[in-house]
Amino acid sequence: MTLNVDAGGDGRQAPSPPTERVVAVMHLLAGDPARSFSLADISRRLGISRATGHAILATLAHHRWVVRHEPSASYSWGPAIGALARPTHDREFRSLLEGLSESVGAQVFLARREGAMLKVTDSVGDSLAAPRVTAGLRMPLVAPFGRDYVAWAGEQAIKAWLAGIGEPSTALRKRLTSVLAQVRERGYVIERLSREYVRVYLALRALAADGEPDEITARLAGAFADLTLVDYLPDELDGSAEHQIATISVPVRDSDGVVSMSITAAPFRGLSAKEIRQFGAAVRDVARRIEESR
């Protein structure tokens, strides 16, 4: 059924039809914030012309109320909407972050999704080995990074995430698909610590300062994914070997069940499989406590 946004709910003319169209677009995107909609899909669902839809979306994207994804020319819920509803910092969770940092002996930080970017909103603790992470730091949400945000987001969102780095090889697609399934099962993401990881991480931080992910960002992330082993599968954590771990991250869901934030501990040192599980459990516990307090 096509929604006619030119009429009021009782059949009378709406006080401001153009405003009603904007509201209808926002309601559509808010109904599935993890999904990206094409202009044709939005226009068809709302019963508006493509020209009208394009004008509305271009204006909303300018104000970051929606995000336009260049590779697919599609649109999704934007970061500026969340900023209207609450402050952009999350100092209210500082005591939880401090407790976690002290218990695991690592730097801990909280990040929030803003469209195709992740923004650190609070950080505690120090590390001599790890790059310093401070509030305000931005990172692109581009494969293979951001697995804690996309693992539960549904097939379409995962396809869009993979498409962000072009056409992954069969081996890489299989690896990332298996990794996402494992992330859903254990509840947290593991980043391996390597020289390549540190170099790519620092480069992506620098690129993120220039705005939304671009082709250079995608190619760099894709090359990293192709040349390294992403995360861990169950048989790779067997035995008593020490594993060099950069970070362990857990998703934080909002009241609608959407992953809008993540909490990360950054050991940047060797851990046994048992210690990795203990780290993951500790971070998961704090993530659940944040969810319960929201």
Image (cartoon, grey):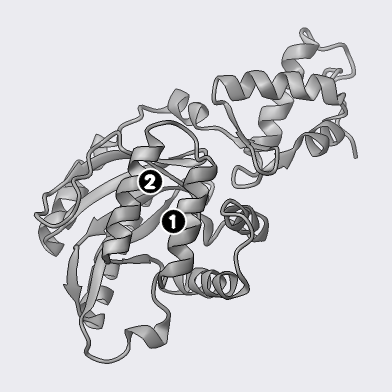
Q: Residue at x 41, y 67 (%)?
A: 187
For label 2, the SS is helix
Amino acid type at mark 2: Leu
| Residue 204, label in figure | 2
Depth check, front residue: 251 or 1: 251
**Spatial separation of the CA atoms under disc 1 and disc 2:** 10 Å
Left or right position of 43 against 88: right
Amino acid type at mark 1: Phe
Depth check, front residue: 267 or 277: 267
Image quarter in which the C terminus is found: top left
Depth check, front residue: 226 or 275: 226
Where 60 falls versus 200 (above or below)? above
For label 1, the SS is loop
Q: Which residue position is annotated with label 1? A: 145
Where 53 falls versus 291 (above or below)? above
Q: Residue at x 77, y 13 (%)?
A: 18
How many numbered circles does the render carry? 2
Depth check, front residue: 147 or 185: 147
Left or right position of 115 against 186: right
Q: Residue at x 62, y 22 (%)?
A: 60
For label 2, count other residues whose C-alpha is less than 10 Å away and answer few (under 14), some (14-19) or many (20+): many
Image quarter in which the N terminus is found: top right
Instruction: Say whether residue 24 is visible.
Output: yes
Asked if labels 2 and 1 touch by Cβ distance under 8 angstroms, the answer is: yes
Q: Position of residue 63 (x, y in %)?
A: 55, 20
Q: Residue at x 51, y 68 (%)?
A: 180
Quarter holding residue 62: top right
Q: Position of residue 232 (x, y in %)?
A: 39, 76
